[in-house]
Image (cartoon, rainbow, N blue to C red):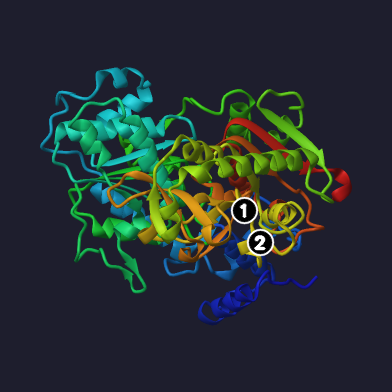
Amino acid sequence: MKKKFSTDLNKSLLATLIRYFPPIEFDETLIDIVNVLMDGLTRGDVYIDMKETPQNRDFIYEGWPSRHMKALIKSGWTQGDKSPIVLNGDLVSWRRTHNEIAETINKILVRNKPFVNLSKEIPVRIDAKNQESLNIQQLEAVNLVNRQRIILLSGGPGTGKTSTILQMLMQAISRDPNLNIAMAAPTGKAAKKLKDTVQAGIENLQDPLKNKLATIPSKTLHRWLEAGPNGFRRNSKRLLKLDLIIIDEMSMVDLATINGLLDALTKSCQIILVGDPNQLLPIGSSGIWQTLQEKETKTNFQENSIKLTKSYRNKGDIALLRNTLEVAGVDAFWNLLSTKTESPNALHYLSSLKSIPEPVVKTLLTYKKKLKNLTENCINHIPKESWQSSMIEVSQSVEITKLLKFTESLLILCPQRYGPWGVNKIHEFLLGKRFEKEVTRWSEGTPVMAKSNQPELGLANGDVGIIIGQGEKRRFLFNVFSEEQRLVTRLINPSRLNMYDAAYAMTIHKAQGSEADQVLLLWPRTSKVSEGSPPPQHCSADYEKRMLYTAITRAKKQLHVFTNKEEDF
């Protein structure tokens, strides 16, 4: 049968390859190779494992992978340093991306030198009480702060990364109170969360250590680099004068950004990279964190690479499911989940795709009613003059604090935006079929998500607030960090936001960096009714694994997973 292309771009790419790299021998299975590599690149996958059968059901990969491997070798496209494709065992990748990864790792390794002016016997003067609560892996990471310029700290949700970061900061300050320290993350939401969690951890500390930690700025990497239409304004010619930088959520950092940062930092700057290698990769771009966690790469860093394994969250069946997914893979995960019918904190439901599952509907309606009631309780605690401003800080009353805290109690997650169980279907059910065109009619108490970074408002892409007030008094209530790095509550006129969306539900990608007591995951496992975005089964096994891992690890206490019945297949 005649092969087809997944996109016109893939077709054009193959034509370009044939023009500039004429194959020694052409086989139509090369079309499959191009499709698979390009589809992987859009997900952020640098390397494609040929042992995994491509999951896109719109295509038939006859003879995969032996026929494709032979065709690729015979084409000559993997021969020589200037060839377009790299084949390493069962792994295949674009050479350009492969080389960019190698160059980035080399940039990091060049900096991987111990402090020569510091003794390993330097006295530790940080809070001994807090140190006692750290496990051995965390202590090892903290002790590295006095010895190494590059530190890699990995671990899943709830493994104590944040408490370790706090102790590492305290260790650095005890070494030199005058250090110029920065915290960073790939998204505004993640940068804000990092600042918030560090802030919460210093409440019982004494001055001046507390004051120093409280004033450490946390920004997106793009803000640190002063990104503009022509690239980064911070670079090798205009360096960031930092002594130490901690970068969180490294799984979401793409190659261009990490390279820009490495170029903009002084050679003496200490760098601490933190993240979870099992989470989703940067959308449409290549990540670096997963490669840094591979065994072959980690050996270059020796003791500098610490993995936290003890979980202080996701206990019970949530932890069991997470570990099963991480170690045994997707099939083992689904097999285990199917047995969880009466679990205290992880349940599996089979429902028809013809409608939103009844337990989800019940939870949503209860959640919506509670939000509306809490919002109405806040109105009288906002001064009348505050409604005259387009943006103003309001006092964090008990009622307002309770409302914003409640928005963090529930996450409804979907792998895609469209389809019967997509984000839009949830919002259509709660807000009406024209919800996207009638945003001004969304009811009071509706959660909203900022869809762009707006530093002038203190808002980051992914921040969730709440609609409060009606008519001319209609405003959005958000918790944000001020220019002075204080957590404040702001009342913002909707007209000030560039883009926003309803946030009763969100995609798994948007949920990265978030967590909630209860998570409801809607996971349709059929292609018959999909619209727009590819459904889960169109993804590679690795991508499905990352999607599921990211989704279930958002849950702190309860996880409910919904899949469709066999009749929908």
In this view, which residue lies farthest toward the front? Answer: 384
In this view of the protein, which residue sits in the foreground, 142 or 205? Answer: 205
Question: Which residue is label 2 attached to?
Answer: 68
User: SS at mark 2?
Assistant: helix
Quadrant of the image containing the N terminus: bottom right
Q: Is residue 210 above or below residue 493?
A: above
Residue 314 in the image: state x and y as whole percent: 56, 28
Within 10 Å of disc 2 (Cα), the crowding (few <14, some 14-19, many 20+) is many
Dots 1 and 2: beta carbons under 8 Å? yes
Residue at the limit of the structure toward the right, as seen here? 567
Residue at the location (71% across, 24% down)?
Answer: 343
Q: CA distance from mark 1 to mark 2?
A: 9 Å
Mark 1, residues whose alpha carbon is within 10 Å: few (<14), some, or many (≥20)? some
Marker disc for residue 208:
none
Report the residue that reaches farthest toward the bottom. Answer: 19
Specify whether 507 is left or right of 402. right
Mark 1 lies on a secondary structure that is: loop
Residue visible at 37% across and 30% down?
163
Q: Is residue 456 above or below residue 152?
A: below
Q: Which of the 4 image quarters holds residue 345? A: top right
Amino acid carrying mark 1 in the image: Met
Sequence-first tag of 1 and 2: 1
Which residue is under mark 1? 50
Q: Is residue 547 left or right of residue 83?
A: right
Q: Quadrant of residue 42?
A: bottom right
The amino acid on which the numbered mark 2 sits, given as a three-letter code, is: His
In which image quadrant can residue 117 be found?
top left
Percent coordinates x, y for residue 4 in the rendering: 72, 72
In percent of width and height, residue 207 lies at 19, 29
